[in-house]
Image (cartoon, rainbow, N blue to C red):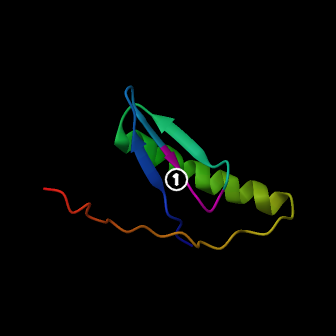
Amino acid sequence: MNYLVVVEEGETGFGAYVPDLPGCVAVGETEQEVIHLIRDAVRLHLEALQEQGLPIPKPRSHAELVGAGIQ
């Protein structure tokens, strides 16, 4: 399964979260680091759900880039 990951740049680094997995987040100093960390976070999140006997959420989110129409 592939989940949408949202990566945001802040003033001091990067953050990432998975809309379909509430609470699954990561922070890092670089974009590359946060992508690496969120991959681990997704794996650990899904393993924890399985260990608890909880259902694995299906990926439902997607992304679109939309122009604002301003030049």
Could you say which quadrant of the image residue 57 lies in?
bottom right
Q: Quadrant of the C terminus?
A: bottom left
Q: Residues within 10 Å of mark 1 (few under 14, many from 20)?
A: some
Q: Position of residue 67 (x, y in %)?
A: 25, 64
Front-most of 6 and 54?
Answer: 6
Q: Which residue is most to the top? A: 12
- Left or right of 29? Residue 24 is right
Could you say which quadrant of the image residue 10 lies in?
top left
Give the residue drawn at x 56%, y 49%: 40
Front-most of 51 and 62?
Answer: 62
- Left or right of 8? Residue 66 is left
Bounds of the magenta segment: 16-21
Give the residue drawn at x 62%, y 63%: 20
Q: Position of residue 29 (x, y in %)?
A: 40, 31
Q: Which residue is most to the right? A: 53
Give above or below for 62 relative to 44: below
- Left or right of 71? Residue 36 is right
Which residue is the site of mark 1? 39
Amino acid on which disc 1 is placed: Arg
Give the residue drawn at x 18%, y 57%: 70
Q: Position of residue 23 (x, y in %)?
A: 67, 48
Q: Position of residue 50 (x, y in %)?
A: 79, 63
Give above or below for 65 relative to 37: below
Q: How many marks?
A: 1
Give above or below for 30 relative to 55: above
Front-most of 56 and 20?
Answer: 20
Asked whether residue 18 is drawn in magenta, I would say: yes
Examine the residues drawn in magenta and state their main secondary structure. Answer: loop
Asked whether residue 65 is drawn in magenta, I would say: no
Q: In what element is the residue under mark 1?
A: helix
Give the residue drawn at x 39%, y 25%: 12
